[in-house]
Image: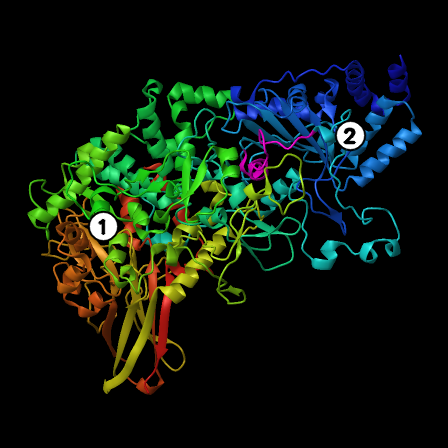
Amino acid sequence: MIMRLLARLFPALAPLLLLVLPALTQAQSGQARPADLPLPSTMPLIDYEDLLFPWIANRRYEQLGWKRDKSWRDTGPFVFNMSFGIHPAVRMYYSPEIIAWLEGGRTGEIADGAIVIKEMVTPPSGPYNAYHAELVSKFPGDAARIDAEMAQYAYESGGLNWTVLVKDSAVSHGGWFFASVYFANKTDMQARKPVIDRFEPPFSPPLAAAGDGMCMRCHASAAEELIFSALANIEGYPGEPLVFRIDESWRDLPDAQKPAFGATLPDMIKSYLGDAHDPATQRAAHAAAAKASPVAVNPTFAAMFPATGGIDIPRSKLQTLPSEWLDAVPPRPDDTQHFLTSDNCVGCHGGLGGAPSGVTMFVKDGAEYGAGYNISEYGEWRWSPMGLAGRDPIFYAQLESEFALLEAAGAGELSANLGTTCLSCHGAMGQRQLEIDAHAKPDLGLDGNDFKMSYTLLHTPLTQDEKDRQIADGSFPYHEYGNLAREGISCAVCHHIAPPERAEGQPDYNKLDTYLMNGTTGVFRMTPADTLVGPYDDVLQKPMQNALGITPMQSDYISDSEMCGACHTINLPNVDADPGTPLPGFTAAEQAILNEAAQNAVTFLSDTVGATYREPLVKFQHSIEQATFLEWQNSQYADPGTAQSCQDCHMKRNFETPDGTVKIDSLTTQIATIQDANLPEVFHSLPHDEIDVPVRDSYKRHNFVGLNAFMVEMLSQFDEEMGLGAKDPMTYATNGAQLSLDTMALQARDETADVTIESVTNPDGQVLEAVVTVDNKTGHRLPSGVGFRRAFLELRVTDASGAQIWCSGCTNAAGVIVGPDGAPLDTEFLDVVPPGATEALYQPHYDLIDAQTEVQIYEELTQNAQKEFTSSFVHRVYHPKDNRLLPWGAAEPGSDAFIKRFGPSAVTAAFMKATMPEGRAAADAGIMAGKDSLTYRVTLPAGTDPQTVTVTATLYSQAIPPYYLKQRFETAPDGPATQRLYYLASRLKTEGTLIENWKLRIQGDTASLP
């Protein structure tokens, strides 16, 4: 009766009064009911959000009489108008299952369906508790009115939002489902219409997830059941909540009565952007960081690569990739699997970008939170070629070409075998977990021998309709493996790799030969699923055990270059070569060694995971398609006294910006951010010695870059199409891609090659001679990796006015090398066969260049069995040219220096043949020594004074040169991945970027006559 009267007197409060009345009745009777919600594991994500989020936004838990905190409380200090809490001000509600567990002394497991709800408002708690005190004074004894007014105040003034934990032991190892609930605007707040995930551009982290890594970074430090809840915080129980310092900066007082005369801490230190825990702020930040993808076609590119065969498609027909935040695979609840996605890691290993959270694995260049560079493990990996390998549009177009070539040769049945082999590196986690599960759980009916490209387009169904469609087309059992594969070479790959071992019956190989015969081409042994390895022997274990069911352990092997060789020594079949005859340049014994190594991989996979997908490939003659690790091993960089490992160069200890404004020689930081002793105190935390993360003065960045700026630029400029978001989830930095490119720029400028014009002379009248040297500074060949990479020298001569009068190696805006007439050289696409000839023209290795149509290009060129130039990985029969610069100290197999380094091993000698030059370069002592010297003889135009001209030599790199692109576009023009590559490449903006005019500058020099 009283409630109805109040509702008539105060109609605006009627909905709230109706909500709180049942709660008060139940509270008075001591009753509380559990939520009548399904478990999150029983429904697709968005369907579950559609149920849970409105239930929360309407505060239905109030109707159930749940226990709540004694008051609004802070989660950390609040000074100078800034919160240093882990969350905003909170008031928590606890379902009956949680209360029963707390009353039972926090022992045993929390029952499924239990829920903890954090009501969160703008900090500090002072205004809300003060307002509550006013209401108590104003409406004494009227609990319903007080609660209704208080709820309205929280909605209207506090920006009420929620963090929710739902216990469901079926969702992940930790058994918790986390959610953030908020309103997009005031209209939606008044309608109680919360935001629901849609996974549409601009991409941002999901609002709900099983085992959310950004939540687990703190919750893993809880002593029991991953929560810190304490009865001391809850109404009706003895004890007092934790109290933190709150100054008067929040009060409506004259400046003279405020700390620092009213100045806020952001005013004082200019370092605060907003509350990092407010989901609305997070979503707004991700939207603000989004940028439009290029749409205009580069006319020069279109002229060089005409759109034929239906390759040029509109944006509406483009094959796009799912949001990176759908790459979500938590640890399984029953038994942690080997491979998990990086969203499980980002919370602890994603860095912190400034006040109030702190600065961890981050380099600041401004006051605001997130201003600077995220150098955390996750932050730099995300935008490295390793982190992007599972989304690499170039790789997928290459696969389509390989399949088309196999089909044309009548060997299309090998496509699945080859594709699965390639994806064992590029989609390592998905491919491996699939073969593991197919072997361990045959009743699932999974095919572990065919990892289809189409799996990389799958994601966990978000609605029942999506789930029904996947079930109907048979793809539903494979979506988890697509989520894993898109992560490329992710955290759980490298941190699971174990040293190779000799199989039973194999010869007594030394360490190197054991690896060569048992550990290349994406085949590696792994640590147990519940163990990850790292370089430190004093790492904390309990938080990761709590969060993931995984124990971090120390291993020297993760610092060994050989570990990198698992994917950077590739031994592949040549499917169009005579299987009964050794490949050109190989003896029968050498060929047998490479073939045996391939067979060992087949045996290992069959014995360990029952996989047979490589068996059909071993009948072909094998050769080394990529030799980066071998090149390093056969150099002074692997020798005692001069050694530098892969990790030394590609996991830097220092930080520098390209302009030199920031330069830090050695990085000191924690390597993880968790709920440790440096954060505000909580109840029921693990002992400090189990969560006190040490500060390391030997931090090594996970930058992992080479010179493939082309791929990073593509995915950065077309992040919407490729499923990526520009905003970092932990630090809010928006320059992750640019940091990767900046690191490449520094590596190109300082660590790749020295280009020197040794002399400029005028031997005869209008003839100028310039001697140019290129000195390889890398620990492998230059260029290295896949064979189609190339570097080339541009030698440009200008007159006194700066006008160009001669050039070898000049390009157009599409990176195509042109002659003096501006037309592409006949050698540029490797497809011009002169009359009477049987092979296409190409640029040989030069010692002397005297024509503008001659260019020094450092590259490997391969031909198929018909002696047609190819960029296929499995048609590499002939090698007419390989003049890539060797690293310092390279030794020829069979030489005294080689035997001194490796001993008389036939295995090592057979593999190391892949590190040697071919064609004309084989006789060039400079190439062997890693320092090429060549002479340019330039005939100047009549009337040009040689004393007034300037000679400029520049070395450029092209990760995807013109002939490579042309072969992709012509080989499979109807393939969706190839069409996607054409779409991206033809619209890629290069002006003002590191790859202007489709080439990356490495180094150069300028000189004139003395």
Q: In which quadrant of the rendered image does the N terminus lie?
A: top right
Where residue 902 sits: x, y (%)? 18, 57
What residue occupies the far top of the structure in this picture? Answer: 1
* Residue 872 at least partly seen: no
Dividing the picture into quadrants, the one containing residue 532 is top left
Residue 239 in percent (x, y) is at 76, 31
With 418 as the anchor, is 262 left or right in this view?
Answer: right
Element class at badge 2: loop
What are the residue bounds of the magenta stretch? 212-230
Upstream in sequence: badge 1 or badge 2:
2
Q: Is residue 123 magenta?
A: no
Q: Which colour assignment does the render follow? A: rainbow
| Mark 2 closeness class: few <14, some 14–19, many ≥20 residues within 10 Å | some
> For residue 102, what is the image quadrant?
top right
- The residue under label 1 is 512
Up/down of 406 relative to 900, above or below: above
What's the amino acid at mark 2? Lys
Quadrant of the image containing the C terminus: bottom left
Q: Residue at x 25, y 33 (%)?
A: 605
Tell me the element at label 1.
Answer: helix
Could you say where residue 363 lies in the image, as x and y percent from the top left? 55, 57
